Amino acid sequence: MTTENFNAEFRRQLRSLFAVLRAIVRQSANGESSKSDYAAYLEGRIGTLARVQDMLMRAPGDGIDLEELVHGELLAQAAPASRYRAIGPDTRIGREAAVPLALALHELTLNALLHGVLGEPSGELEVSWDHEDAGGQKRLRLLWVERGPNKPRLPPTHRGFGLELLEKTLPYELDACTRVEWPEQGAQIEILLPAVGKASFWRPGDKALTP
């Protein structure tokens, strides 16, 4: 890459980073009841953004390891390691998809700790992913499945930052298909990412899946 191309790419990435920061600051203020809540949620989301940027800077152009991304968010919020597992094939996530996906994982982890199965003694979480071929289109299928005590679990009454990410941001920015359900045992989330456009993913050594 020439110096001119490198500088142009750096400027583009910087503009993208500040755009994400502005969105996080603006959307974090929606619905928070106190300044302390706003500050805490904002700090957590900016922390996620910082971790993703650090991962991306290690090897620009090589994306992020999905397993590291999942474990990173769970560990960052001190989720009990004995109560969750993350399983799936080696997968790299492209730059454009990494940030919104990491923020979604952050929100899901936070919700599981504060309101879901990771906040209960007997609750468990499984995060799994696999590659699919749907009608000739390759896509990544990621499942977030909570398993807890059989007691009523009502959907959230407040549409917060996390639901906005899952139901609007991911479909709009990455052409993803998402499904959010709230059975009695805990939240169940499905995210389908296509291997085209900004929502790129690939297996290590198999660049044919990148756009």
Image (cartoon, rainbow, N blue to C red):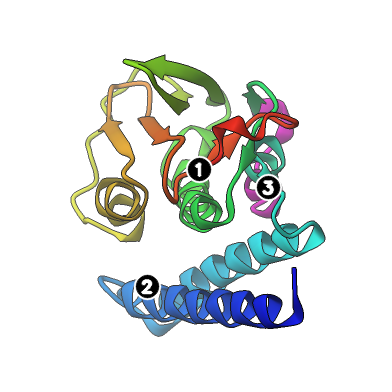
Decide which of tag 2 and tag 1 comes sooner along the chain: 2
Mark 2 Cα shell of 10 Å, populated few (<14), some (14-19), many (≥20): many
Residue at left 48%, top 32%? 117
Of labels 2 and 1, the one closer to you: 1
How far is disc 1 from disc 3 in space, using C-alphas? 16 Å
- Residue at the left extreme? 157
* Relative to 89, 115 lies left or right: left
Which residue in the structure is indicated by mark 1? 211
Earlier residue among tags 1 and 3: 3
Report helix, strand or loop for mark 2: helix
- Asked if residue 98 can be seen in this view, the reply is yes
Q: Amino acid at mark 1?
A: Pro
Q: Main secondary structure of the magenta part?
A: helix
Direction from residue 131 to residue 164 in the image, left or right: left
The residue at which mark 3 appears reads as 64
Q: Given this view, does label 1 or label 3 mark the residue nearer the observer? A: 1
Q: Which region is colored magenta?
A: 73-83
Quarter holding the N terminus?
A: bottom right
Task: First in sequence, mark 3 or 2: give its number.
Answer: 2
Disc 2 target residue:
28
Measured in 3D between alpha carbons, the distance from the residue under mark 2 to the one under mark 1, in whole angstroms, is 32 Å
